[in-house]
Amino acid sequence: MEAEKRWLKSILHIENNQSSKDEQYLELKDADHLLHLLHRTLSENAEIPRKDGISQCTFRNVNELMDVGIHFTPSETMSLAHIKYLQGWLWFTADVELPPITVDDSTKPLLLNLIAYETCTRDASKAWVTSYICLLDSLIDHPEDVKVVRKAGVLENSLGSDNEVAKLFNEIGTDLVPNSLAYLDAKSKIQKHYKSWSNTLISQLKSDCDELCKFLDVKSPWAFLALLGALIALGLSVIQTYYSVWSPKSDCDELCKFLKINHHL
């Protein structure tokens, strides 16, 4: 029993000195074999929602979602069944919690075995590994997408370059059929956020700002805003100086001249 537990902890990258919170899913009872044990751990407390609303959700990759204010954070559970969409304190921002995953040399064969196990069960409601890989495949198109989730703490790359990780998920995700109801609530909210006209407008403004920053050789949008503020202040100063020196004559000027002559002001 202890040998199986040590194996499972090594696969899930749980250290021996971590808190019991990370080990609460390591229930070894009634497991037919090690693959069954691992799959049950990764789909702990999974619930398939009832079909209420759209079930076909399509959205872009990580970087395009970032452009409309969606950010990614690691969830506190290792279960692949729990993905949450959390609205931010600004209407155009949101966080998507994803189960953290470590990618190394053993990841591909391990995922393929888990997917094969789900295929043999013939129960779509238990296809959480397949559904999660399909979700990652849709989110990760390029090495830049891997870089974003890696920096967010969602993915730990022990495989090599980000390009290799992107290639791994794209290869595994080919021809997979996920459960269409998996993550339905989160995916519906992501799609709604992505298609919002106000978020699209903000995304376009951000994109234009980034292009202008590149043109002006400014390294960040904040530096661009500081530069823009300085230019506006300089322009206002020039306008004030112009009107102070070359201001056009008015009736008020004639009145002031008259008062100075006659009243010695």
Image (cartoon, helix red, strand yellow):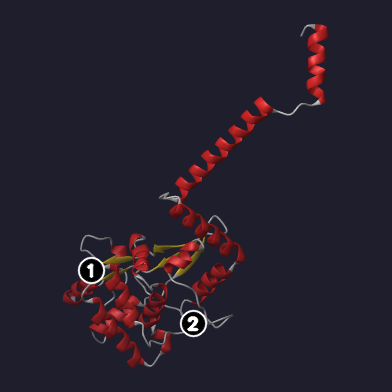
Query: Could one spot residue 18 in this view of the protein?
Result: yes
Query: Could one spot residue 30 in this view of the protein?
Result: no
Q: Secondary structure at mark 1?
A: loop
- Residue beneath the point at 64% across and 30% down: 242
Q: Is residue 26 left or right of residue 152?
A: left
Q: Which mark is residue 160?
A: 1
User: What residue occupies the far top of the structure in this picture?
Assistant: 264
**Residue 238 location in percent, x, y?**
59, 33
Number of the front mark, 2 or 1: 1
**Residue 191 location in percent, x, y?**
53, 72
Q: Amino acid at mark 2?
A: Leu
Q: Which mark is residue 181?
A: 2
Q: Quadrant of the C terminus?
A: top right
- Residue beneath the point at 38% across and 86% down: 176
Q: CA distance from mark 2 to mark 1?
A: 33 Å
Nearest to N terminus: mark 2 or mark 1 = 1
Q: Quadrant of the N terminus?
A: bottom left
Q: Are marks 2 and 1 in contact (CB under 8 Å)?
A: no
Vertical relation: 116 (above or below) 251:
below
Q: Quadrant of residue 108?
A: bottom left
**Residue 221 location in percent, x, y?**
46, 51
Q: Is residue 130 left or right of residue 84?
A: left
Q: Which mark is residue 248?
A: none
- Residue beneath the point at 47% across and 76% down: 183
**Residue 70 location in percent, x, y?**
48, 63
Q: Quadrant of residue 148?
A: bottom left
Vertical relation: 244 (above or below) 209:
above
Q: Secondary structure at mark 2?
A: loop
Q: Which one is nearer the viewer's eye here, 192 or 15?
A: 192
Disc tally is 2
Q: Amino acid at mark 1?
A: Gly
Crowding at label 2, few (<14), some or many (≥20) Cα neighbours within 10 Å? Answer: many
